[in-house]
Amino acid sequence: MHSDPGAAERRRQLATTICIVVAVRWLMEAAWVFATRQVSWRLAFFWTLPSWLILAPLAVGTVVLANRFPFERRKRVLTVVVHALACAAFGIIHLTGITPFRVLLAGEPMNWERLQHAFIVAVRLLLYLDVVTYWAIVGMYLALHYSNLRASLAEARLAALRAQLNPHFLFNTLNAVSTLALKGDQSATTEILGRLGGLLRAALEGHTEEISLARELDFLDDYVAIQRIRFADRLSVEKCIAPDTLEGLVPTMILQPIVENAIEHGVNAQRGVGNVGVSAVRHNGALVIEVRDSGPGFLPAATHNGIGLSNTRARLEQLYGSDYRFEYGSASEGGASVRICIPFHQTVA
């Protein structure tokens, strides 16, 4: 998993969120005890201390659940059901935990009848506070989550530009243009400049995070055409794309850095013809895209944390949360393989 420089800051924000919500909740309960039992504030806070100690781990669990079910569009109904049940469990666990302390502090006998009565009273008087507390924690977490998500997407977009159009690629392309121009090959020069312009526009002017796979493959064709100028007959690229995948949405220019790695470490690493294969199929509601090459594969000692793979994983995580798979390694039949699995979805008409 790639490193996230903002993870420490997000943990600090979440810890602050939990402390604020639980502290406010504790203050509200202490105020209720102060008003109804006519005791000092000091005694009211002491009486409600067990409530705070039970709320703290419940709040942490609520944040974990909110992270697992953040009201994503594709799982909204399931998320609502999960949070409704969790909210009820939050209140029952909390009120059950504080009931013995309420009986004890009231100086009443610790028997089943008194515990049952105290629990019913706690439900009637305090359950609404637990419901408010639960949804306050979820709401504050989601506000932080989507605020960080927006910032991370902006950072990922900049990193993607560095990975997708790195200086080596631009230098090699411009060098090829210069060579073709000196040879007087006007047609090839015009074609390569046109394709390079298309790639630059896609990278620099794209304002959408997702495009159709068909459009993504058009960008890839531009990139491969430029690389063929460099490698000539040494580069062979084959595509096996299932027709029912073409309208599926994928992250913009997600394939270019992966194919670039395949060419640089696969084709460029061997003397003969290097083969790169790109395939796409639908499987169990998911879009599965795979890029293979005929090179030496991933070296066992390599960390594989280059900017291309790290950036790809980061973008997938930001767009799909935990609802994706990103796998890479040496294929059993030789060469390297990179596989992306994301939910299949299309533009709503």
Image (cartoon, rainbow, N blue to C red):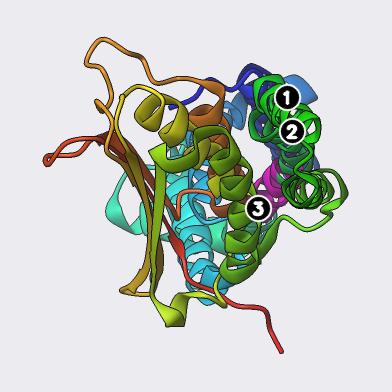
Could you say where residue 46 lies in the image, as x and y percent from the top left? Answer: 62, 23
Provide the residue designation for mark 1: 175
Q: Which mark is residue 183?
A: 2
Spatial CA span between label 3 and label 2: 22 Å
On the rendered structure, is 74 left or right of 285? right
Of all residues, the one furthest to the left in this rendering is: 332
Name the amino acid type tagged 1. Asn
Quarter of the image with the N terminus in it: top left
Q: Secondary structure at mark 1?
A: helix
Mark 3 Cα within 10 Å, few/some/many (few <14, many 20+)? some
Residue 40 shows up from this direction? no
Q: Earlier in the sequence, mark 3 or mark 2?
A: 2
Which secondary structure type mostly characterizes the magenta part of the structure?
helix
Spatial CA span between label 2 and label 1: 12 Å
Q: Nearer the viewer, residue 279 or 300?
A: 279
- Find out whether the residues at labels 2 and 1 contact each other: C-beta distance under 8 Å: no
143 in magenta: yes
Q: Residue at x 16, y 36 (%)?
A: 334
Residue 97 shows up from this direction? yes
Q: Nearer the viewer, residue 141 or 150?
A: 150
Mark 2 Cα within 10 Å, few/some/many (few <14, many 20+)? few
Quarter of the image with the C terminus in it: bottom right
Could you say where residue 124 lies in the image, as x and y percent from the top left? Answer: 60, 65
Q: Earlier in the sequence, mark 3 or mark 1?
A: 1
Spatial CA span between label 3 and label 1: 17 Å
Q: Which of the 4 image quadrants contains residue 162? A: top right
Q: Which mark is residue 222?
A: 3
On the rendered structure, is 300 left or right of 235? left
Q: Which mark is residue 232?
A: none
